[in-house]
Image (cartoon, rainbow, N blue to C red):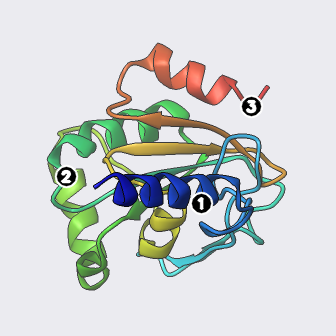
Amino acid sequence: MKVKALLLALLVTLLIFSPGCLGGDEEVGVEGEPVPVFSLTADDGEKYSSDNLLGTAYILHFSASWCNNCRPTMHAVSNQLNDSTYIIVSTDNSDSAKLSDWHLQVNDSKEDSLVSAPFSVGVELSQSFEINNTPTLILIDKNGMVVSKHFGPLEEQQEIDSFWAQLD
């Protein structure tokens, strides 16, 4: 038993002190780091990518069609930030065939409020950011750098303004 414990301790020590053995030193999607390379085709027919969004600050909102708690955040952020670039990104591959339907359902979920943001599927992107909970919003500056992450609902005007103001 002592030999097994000693071997386990030795293995853990080697893993901790061996550079790159767990996938490299580079963390992806970390605040202050570049956004991972991505390309998404949205329900508006447009392509949104890390390359063509350079020069524009934007929010990636990770969600899924089954996330009813995400809808109030979508309405609040879309209405508060008006013309700012805001992209809904599904973490679920099954959403790819029904993006337009999902978008309509979100818009039907609240009277007098339309979410004009494009809806897309980005499973690989959500994995790069290690998204485990929805909603998760990630703020990207005009240089393509991750500024901030927000986990959970974001519905209050002041909170949305504060999140966006981190760009300044």
Residue hosting label 3: 167
Q: Where, quadrant-wise, is the C terminus in this rendering?
A: top right
Of the residues shown, which amino acid type is indicated by label 3? Leu
Report x, y in % for residue 4: 35, 60
Residue hosting label 1: 15
Name the secondary structure under disc 1.
Answer: helix
CB within 8 Å, label 1 to label 3: no
Of the residues shown, which amino acid type is indicated by label 1? Leu
Q: Where, quadrant-wise, is the N terminus in this rendering?
A: bottom left
Does residue 68 lie above or below 41 as drawn? above
Does residue 141 lie above or below 39 as drawn? above
Name the secondary structure under disc 3.
Answer: loop
Q: Residue furthest top?
A: 158
Does residue 143 lie above or below 76 as drawn? below
Along the line of sight, the residue nearer the viewer: 49 or 17: 17
Q: Residue furthest front?
A: 2
Q: Residue at x 73, y 63 (%)?
A: 53
Chain-order first, disc 3 or disc 2? 2
Does residue 42 appear anywhere in the picture?
Answer: no
Chain-order first, disc 1 or disc 2? 1
Name the secondary structure under disc 2.
Answer: loop
- Marks 1 and 2 sit apart, C-alpha to C-alpha, by 37 Å
Report x, y in % for residue 107: 24, 52
- Marks 3 and 2 sit apart, C-alpha to C-alpha, by 28 Å
Report x, y in % for residue 160: 50, 25
Residue hosting label 2: 67
| Residue 45 horizontal side relative to residue 102, left or right | right
Q: How many marks?
A: 3
CB within 8 Å, label 1 to label 2: no
